[in-house]
Image: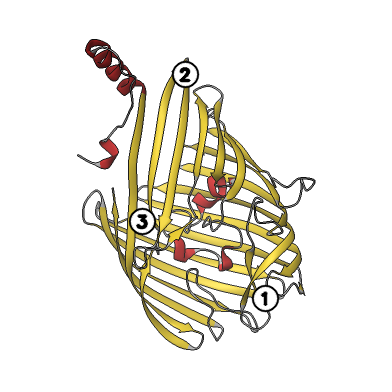
Amino acid sequence: MSAKQNKLFTIPSATAATLAFLGANAHAQSSVTLYGELDTGLAYVSNVGGHAQYKATSGLIDGSFWGLAGTEDLGGGNKAIFQLERGFSVTTGDGFNDHPYYVGLRNETYGTLRVGHQYDSVHDYFAPFTLTGSAGGTAFAHPFDNDNANNAYLARNSVTYASPSFGGFSFGGMYAFSNGAGQFANNRAYSVGANYQSGPFNAGAAYLHVNGRGNTAGGAYDTVNLPGSNRDVFDANVQTQSTYGVGANYAIGDFMLGAAWSRSTYSGVTDAGSGSLEPSVGFSNYEINGVYQWTPKVSLASMYTYTKGSGAHWHQGALQAGYQLSKRTDTYLETVYQRASSRVPAVINTSDPSASRSQLLVAAGIRHRF
């Protein structure tokens, strides 16, 4: 039996007959599911600080994690829900705080309200139209994951709402508190998004705004990685971050054609380590991608992204082939190439910066879901 088929419940003690009745009733109304994924492989990176790198990898597509999800039927179309996920490295055993955990309420008519550590609206309504947010995965992120399409960060202290679908249209939003006394707007965030689907056509848009990012330890977000002027990357505190994006895809038989555009701006930037002031920076990402289910077992995916920065730019192309060994296990081959303009780093997501203007990743991996 799979882990997803296991259901856990507790019942009060009474007589044997009452126990049997209550046990059956609890089983019908509530459930807890254990699930997860292991993703690992081997990779070659052409330039890491001027040297070729051969490494064992963890999570080049989805990352490895385990999770618990549960529901309780409250009657009248209402349910209590929760989700708890934890990321980790298969190769080192290190734990990562890069997955959601929340508790909430769901109503069939009015939608879902959740409180906890959660994805923002960029992840929910924009990212699925990028290849990093769909079949491609982690290594296919835009430079520095500047628009969070690869969900590099989640919002602490967050309240989210997601509507049901109204004739193919749905929407949602998120507010993340700073939790600072007398600092309501220092390291707080909010986002909104919407989606529309009709037959083979699907489109979405999202907006995220953050004030005082990284300024406090218990606020909405930690620091963000930004490119330095000497082909380096630094941790930055940012007084104002704004990200917005739109995307769409269209299914033509077994082929899915997609396109996405996003814009991220960071102003009031300081180096979190040294405290020195740094220039404001903006990124515009233009992506076109395609996914083809060649056979029931073989899938192909590709993308090209042009990222225009403040006085800099990046070209990035990627290919991926997947082979389904079973319903739960698949293997993949992928390659990502990035070329940057002068004086800024080329950095493929999950890699360290190149010493030159270019970087190449070639990798093979295996995933198992449970």
Q: In the image, which disc is placed on residue 213?
A: none
Mark 1 is on which residue type? Ala
Q: Are marks 1 and 2 in contact (CB under 8 Å)?
A: no
Q: In the image, which disc is placed on residue 292?
A: 3
Q: Earlier in the sequence, mark 3 or mark 1?
A: 3
Q: Secondary structure at mark 1?
A: strand
> Residue, x 55% and y 86% (percent of image)?
356
In front of the other: label 3 or label 1?
Answer: 1
Q: Secondary structure at mark 2?
A: loop
Give x and y (percent) for residue 56: 34, 73
Q: In the image, which disc is placed on residue 312?
A: 1
Q: Is residue 137 visible?
A: no
Label 3 crowd (10 A; few <14 / some 14-19 / many >=20): some
Relative to 55, residue 255 above or below:
above
In front of the other: label 1 or label 2?
Answer: 2
Nearer to us in this view, 22 or 279 = 22
Q: Secondary structure at mark 3?
A: strand
Label 1 crowd (10 A; few <14 / some 14-19 / many >=20): some
